[in-house]
Amino acid sequence: MSRVLVPCHVKGTVALQVGDVRTSQGRPGVLVIDVTFPSVAPFELQEIVFKNYYTAFLTIRVRQHTSTHTPAKWVTCLRDYCLMPDPHSEEGAQEYVSLFKHQSPSMTFPKWLSHPVPCEQPTPLLEGLPDPSRVSSEVQQMWALTEMIRASHTSTRIGRFDVDGCYDLNLLSYT
Amino acid sequence: MAAVEKRRQAVAQATSFTDSGRPVVSRAAATAESEEDFLRQAGVTEMLRAALLKVLEARPEEPIAFLAHYFENMGLRSPANGGAGEPPGQLLLQQQRLGRALWHLRLAHHSQRTAFNNNVGVAYECLSASGRKKKPGLDGRTYSELLKRICRDGEAPEEVVAPLLRKIQCRDHEAVPLAVFRAGMLTCFVLLEFVARAGALYRLLEDPGLAVADRRLGQAVLDTLEGALQSSDDTAPARYLEAGSRLGPDSLALAMDRALVARRPSAPMTREEFLEKAAALFIAKVKPVG
């Protein structure tokens, strides 16, 4: 079967960065490349080919429409796929990369007719559970405050001479 | 106040003497110099410098309001307060001292440890100052009163803080050393923050319609926290990693999920009960005075 190129439109890269990180050699961090498939009939994507240029990890997310009624969802096909084993070395820095359909566990690509199974879904929780990340945040702060108090203690004694709370003269020792 | 007025008159008189016959420039110079002198003699320069240092140390969110309270507090300290009439009674003096000590203690958050410790020192001195009938030093009764007041102002329910007070209070007649005072203050303020976090946690757990929390959820979260606080004698990093994993969102979600599945619903847990139980976990780790 011969390979057919799917016409697509690759938008310019958008850098996601915190703060104002800009070095003379480029911009480290996360860069996002949008690829759209304007007005193309449904197709089965088999392979993605590109040439790497100093990207260490690649994540591919796909937005697909399963039917006309449900809203489009974003699905992650590939997460943190390693292109460079050591980001500080040259290996893999300028290689040609081919990604095949079978490499992504869920195999969801735009406008497939089959029903997708997203590769990541947290274990289905009972409805009505409080938000675990916020609960976790509060509990962790409480833990930290308690640990801090446990660690800080003064060795200064107040100098009591009582026996079990009682100052009865008969109980005090004569030493 | 009277002393200040007199000084101002003296300065005015000095300038009027130099008035006649002198050239204008030197009169302006003399006035400028006397103004600076006046400020220095009145103690204003020193007072402003101290005020600015306090602002820098405390880094309050509202510096102007902070300064307003600061100067208001200074006014309380001046001898003019209660000068002409009867001197304020012992009780009033005591209340004033407590109020001032409280004000100092609140200047910096306990996490700003250096500033907090400085303020604790000042508060200690303020409370230890000898009055006419009072011997120098901080007595246990004043210390206990201060602790209760801090907790009350911090809006922590009495039943919640009572176990802590029992642990760290001193006997009425005992003399409280600075180290004990400092530890007590730190523990108190940290407990208040702990209780505030516990309150926020309860709000997350409570059913929005019923305004109470499912007992199974509350107990599951408290049990998880208690488990993370169990001290194994591992080295600190290992203990922190273990606690971190136990208290992560996934682990907590699992614990809550299991609790709902395993047990049948029962009477809900009120906010007071939750706070008491949570505070008990904290207080268990506090070293008692003795």
Image (cartoon, coloured by chain):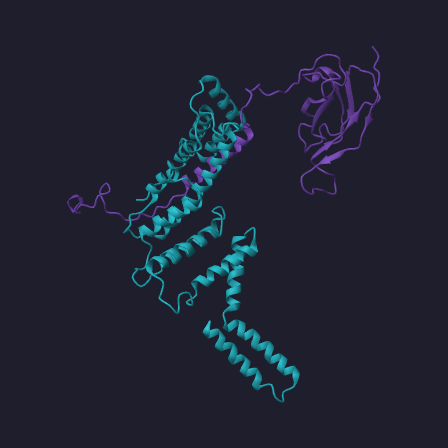
Q: Residue at x 72, y 42 (%)?
A: A23
Q: Position of residue B167 (x, y in %)?
A: 33, 41
Q: Which residue is drawn at 35% across and 46% down?
A: A155
A79 vs B86, nearest the viewer: B86
Furthest residue toward left: A170
Q: Is residue B98 above or below residue B162?
A: below
In screen coordinates, is A115 left or right of B103?
A: right
B147 vs B5, nearest the viewer: B5
Q: Position of residue B6 (x, y in %)?
A: 48, 77
In screen coordinates, is A51 left or right of A21?
A: right
A167 vs A149, nearest the viewer: A167
B165 vs A154, nearest the viewer: B165
Chain B rendering hue: cyan
Chain A rendering hue: purple
In screen coordinates, is A130 left or right of A104?
A: left
Furthest residue toward top: A1
Residue B216, quarter of picture: top left
* Quarter containing the C terminus of chain B: top left
Q: Position of residue A35 (x, y in %)?
A: 78, 26
Q: Residue at x 58, y 77 (%)?
A: B33
